[in-house]
């Protein structure tokens, strides 16, 4: 068994030359009255141009906090206590706000879960998209309107030209999310971060939005970070998956490896929780228990209270990210058993 001594070392493996974006041994803390909550604890991943990385985990796993650090929008009192975030080799965390501002939207853009609260209700959607072009590219009102309609067409809003003057509340949830996507990609970013972009939508619309994101990513060769708690929505769109639990990456692997034979009990539990039509009538599997309180983390492996594979070692020794072959890594002492069970 090849052991990787520290989780941070995963940054040394699995990279090709020149990643677009690198998160390197990131630590984020939130001071509270009851102590320090370590929301992100040594997370490392990288994103290549034209690739999609799905970052997966339950609420509180640190996936969205990591994205907020990348965007430079982390809410106080949260702060980065260690690590780097490099965009095209430059550390974003040592840049001034003046240096970072032009990157936001132009180079790295983000779409959020709740499109309705992200759109301004008192302006038409066309005006809001056109504003991106006026402010960032200095286009005239007429030019910006033309570009906005092109973007509305690009995200497949039906009758885009006729709906330019409609307000956000006049669109369905799925259509509003398309408008948010149009605004996010308007300036041609190199990296798009989509934070739970389909959570508020029904299953059919979820699939349409995922398909749209996938097509746009391919057309423009962006790097896409897809943050989700739902492993079921990323199978057809992601290249790699990083599974997060309690602030750490517990499995990182190509998407097909993860679905074929997960190497971590948590990932295995998530896969078994996906509803399947061929198992109609059978009880849906659920991972027992709840994610830990970040102020009272379990000893050893943070997943041990919920893990059917746990041994005494798990309760005392924090597992490093083991190299499990290829470009796969798992933070589980017993990853060989987990893989064997899936085969
Ligand atoms: Fe389960 Fe132990 Fe692996 Fe943690 S290290 S996931 S407790 S088997």
Image: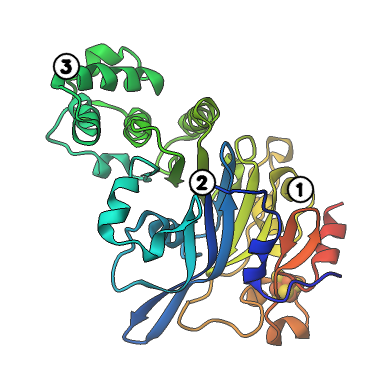
Q: Are marks 2 and 1 in contact (CB under 8 Å)?
A: no
Residue 140 versus residue 7 in the image, above or below: above
Label at residue 225: 2
Where is ligand 1, by quadrant? Answer: bottom right
Q: Residue at x 66, y 69 (%)?
A: 9
Q: Marks 1/3: CA distance?
A: 49 Å
The answer to whether residue 246 is seen in the rendering is no
Q: Is residue 132 left or right of residue 29?
A: left
Q: Which of the two residues, 261 or 93, is positioned nearer the viewer here? A: 93
Kindly check if marks 1 and 3 are in contact, taking CB atoms under 8 A apart as contact. no
The earlier-in-sequence mark between 2 and 1 is 2
The mark lying in front, picked from 3 and 2, is 3
The quarter of the image holding the N terminus is bottom right
- Badge 2 residue CB within 8 Å of ligand 1: no
Q: In the image, residue 26 lies at what x, y percent?
A: 50, 68
Q: Does residue 151 appear anywhere in the picture?
A: yes
> Would you name the residue on which mark 1 appears?
257
Secondary structure under the numbered disc 3 in the rendered image: helix
Instruction: Assign a secondary structure to mark 1.
Output: helix
Q: Nearer the viewer, residue 327 or 103?
A: 103
Q: Distance of mark 2 from mark 1, alpha carbons?
A: 19 Å
Q: Give the numbered dot on residue 306.
A: none
Question: Which is closer to the viewer, label 2 or label 1?
Answer: 2
- Disc 2 residue crowd, few under 14, some 14–19, many 20+, Cα 10 Å: many
Q: CA distance from mark 3 to mark 2?
A: 33 Å
Count of numbered tags: 3
Judged by depth in the image, the label closer to the viewer, 1 or 3, is: 3
The image's mark for residue 142 is 3
Does 316 sit above or below residue 154?
below
Q: Position of residue 196 (x, y in %)?
A: 45, 47
């Amino acid at each position: 068994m090849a052991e990787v001594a520290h989780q941070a070392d995963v940054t040394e493996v699995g990279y090709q030359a020149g990643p677009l974006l690198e998160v390197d041994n990131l630590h984020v803390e939130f001071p509270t009255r009851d102590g320090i909550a370590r929301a992100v604890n040594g997370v490392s991943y990288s994103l290549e141009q034209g690739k999609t990385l799905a970052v997966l985990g339950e609420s509180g796993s640190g996936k969205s906090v990591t994205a907020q650090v990348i965007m430079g929008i982390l809410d106080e009192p949260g702060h980065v206590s260690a690590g780097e975030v490099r965009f095209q080799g430059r550390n974003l965390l040592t840049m001034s706000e003046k240096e970072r501002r032009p990157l936001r939207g132009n180079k790295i853009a983000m779409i959020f879960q709740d499109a309705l609260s992200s759109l301004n209700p008192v302006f038409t959607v066309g005006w809001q998209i056109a504003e991106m072009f006026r402010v960032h590219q200095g286009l005239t009102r007429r030019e910006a309107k033309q570009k906005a309609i092109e973007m509305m067409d690009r995200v497949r809003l039906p009758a885009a030209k006729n709906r330019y003057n409609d307000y956000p509340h006049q669109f369905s949830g799925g259509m509003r999310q398309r408008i948010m996507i149009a605004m996010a990609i308007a300036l041609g970013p190199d990296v798009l971060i989509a934070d739970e972009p389909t959570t508020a939508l029904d299953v059919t619309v979820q699939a349409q939005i995922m398909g749209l994101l996938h097509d746009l990513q391919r057309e423009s060769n962006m790097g896409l970070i897809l943050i989700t708690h739902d492993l079921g929505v990323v199978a057809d769109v992601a290249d790699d998956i990083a599974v997060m639990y309690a602030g750490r990456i517990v499995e990182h692997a190509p998407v097909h490896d993860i679905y074929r034979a997960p190497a971590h009990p948590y990932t295995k539990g998530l896969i078994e929780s996906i509803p399947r039509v061929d198992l109609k009538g059978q009880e849906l599997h659920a991972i027992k228990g709840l994610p830990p309180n970040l102020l009272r983390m379990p000893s050893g492996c943070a997943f041990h209270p919920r893990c059917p594979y746990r041994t005494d070692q798990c309760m005392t020794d924090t597992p490093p990210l083991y190299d499990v072959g290829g470009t796969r890594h798992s933070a589980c002492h017993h990853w060989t058993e987990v893989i064997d069970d899936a085969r």
